[in-house]
Image (cartoon, rainbow, N blue to C red):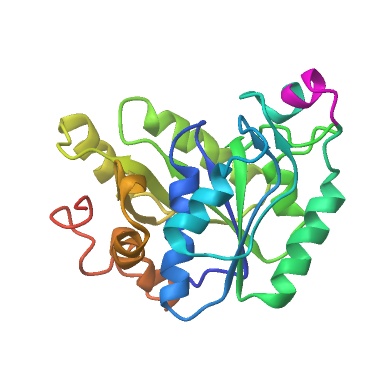
């Protein structure tokens, strides 16, 4: 399958590697000649003036058009942080309009969620899943962990997507250890056999790389070329000997 114009990046939990995956997707798409914009509906836990997740994507992938819908300083779920900071969050329609505007001027728009799939983004209870439903012909990439517990969390997230009729474009393991143990290796093997393709694994600490190194490595980590070209086979070079190397 080919990636649609709008791809939403969600996770099985917080701090699973959504921002790194978003940057890697942006880098791989740009390497294929596509123009890319990135949007984060709500950024929490970042003070005014700090780069935040969009700053990290800009640094790693060199993507110029990286926007936030709202920013909150407290490291909490968006609605809770907004309540404590006496701030009103943008409505779902605002996020939809922003994504559609970005899509009109770019080949792809990547939308990075906050936390997991069902974390509320506004005061009406809308989630990243609702945003995906409001954006026709979009797809969702799910970022998961490599360690113990990831199978249940990943399957639950995929089940929630399927129950809503949402298209899961693929899975990404957001932080692959330098020395994986039996648990990580078996989890990767299990995830690679699901109907939803495992796009790849990002090496842990990949965010510490210089931008040019990250740009050059991201396509190999993700094996994204097969997805872009409609090739359903697992791409060469995504084997266990290469995918976790920095």
Viewer-proximal residue among 68 and 200: 68
Span colored in magenta: 81-87
Q: Is residue 169 visible?
A: no
Q: Is residue 91 visible?
A: yes
Judged from this view, the residue extending furthest toward the bottom is: 33
Residue 86 part of the magenta segment:
yes
Percent across and percent down for residue 90 are 84, 42
Relative horizontal placement of residue 128, taking residue 234 as reference (left or right): right
Q: Residue at x 37, y 35 (%)?
A: 145
Relative horizontal placement of residue 92, taking residue 163 as reference (left or right): right
Percent across and percent down for residue 48 are 68, 37
Q: Residue at x 46, y 44 (%)?
A: 143
Q: Give the answer, above or below, for where 130 lies relative to 111.
A: above
| Tally of marks | 0
Viewer-proximal residue among 94 and 182: 94
Percent across and percent down for residue 60 are 42, 57
Q: Residue at x 61, y 76 (%)?
A: 107
Relative horizontal placement of residue 222, taking residue 84 as reference (left or right): left
Residue 222: name its quadrant. bottom left
Q: Residue at x 70, y 41 (%)?
A: 42
Judged from this view, the residue extending furthest toward the front is: 49
Relative horizontal placement of residue 181, taking residue 229 as reference (left or right): left
Q: Give the answer, above or below, for where 95 lies relative to 63.
A: above
Viewer-proximal residue among 245 and 136: 245
Residue 188: name its quadrant. top left
Percent across and percent down for residue 64 are 58, 65
Q: Give the answer, above or below, for where 199 lies relative to 30.
A: above
């Amino acid at each position: 399958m080919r990636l649609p114009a709008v791809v939403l990046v969600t996770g099985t939990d917080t701090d699973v590697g959504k921002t790194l995956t978003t940057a890697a997707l942006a880098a791989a798409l740009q390497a294929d000649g596509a123009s890319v914009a990135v949007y984060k509906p709500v950024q929490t836990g970042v003070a005014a003036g700090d780069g935040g997740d969009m700053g990290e994507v800009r640094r790693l992938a060199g993507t110029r058009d990286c926007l936030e819908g709202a920013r909150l300083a407290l490291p909490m779920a968006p609605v809770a942080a907004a309540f404590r900071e006496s701030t009103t969050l943008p409505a779902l329609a605002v996020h939809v309009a922003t994504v559609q505007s970005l899509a009109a001027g770019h080949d792809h728009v990547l939308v990075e969620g906050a936390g997991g799939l069902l974390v509320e983004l506004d005061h009406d209870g809308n989630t990243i899943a609702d945003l995906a439903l409001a954006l026709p012909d979009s797809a969702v990439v799910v970022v998961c962990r490599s360690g113990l517990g990831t199978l249940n969390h990943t399957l639950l997230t995929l089940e929630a997507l399927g129950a809503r009729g949402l298209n899961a474009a693929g899975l990404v393991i957001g932080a692959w250890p330098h020395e994986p143990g039996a648990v990580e290796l078996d989890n990767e093997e299990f995830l690679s056999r699901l109907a939803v393709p495992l796009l790849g694994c990002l090496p842990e600490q990949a965010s510490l790389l210089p931008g040019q190194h990250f740009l050059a490595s991201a396509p190999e980590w993700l094996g994204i070329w097969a997805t872009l070209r409609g090739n359903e086979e697992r791409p060469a070079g995504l084997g266990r000997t290469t995918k976790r190397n920095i």
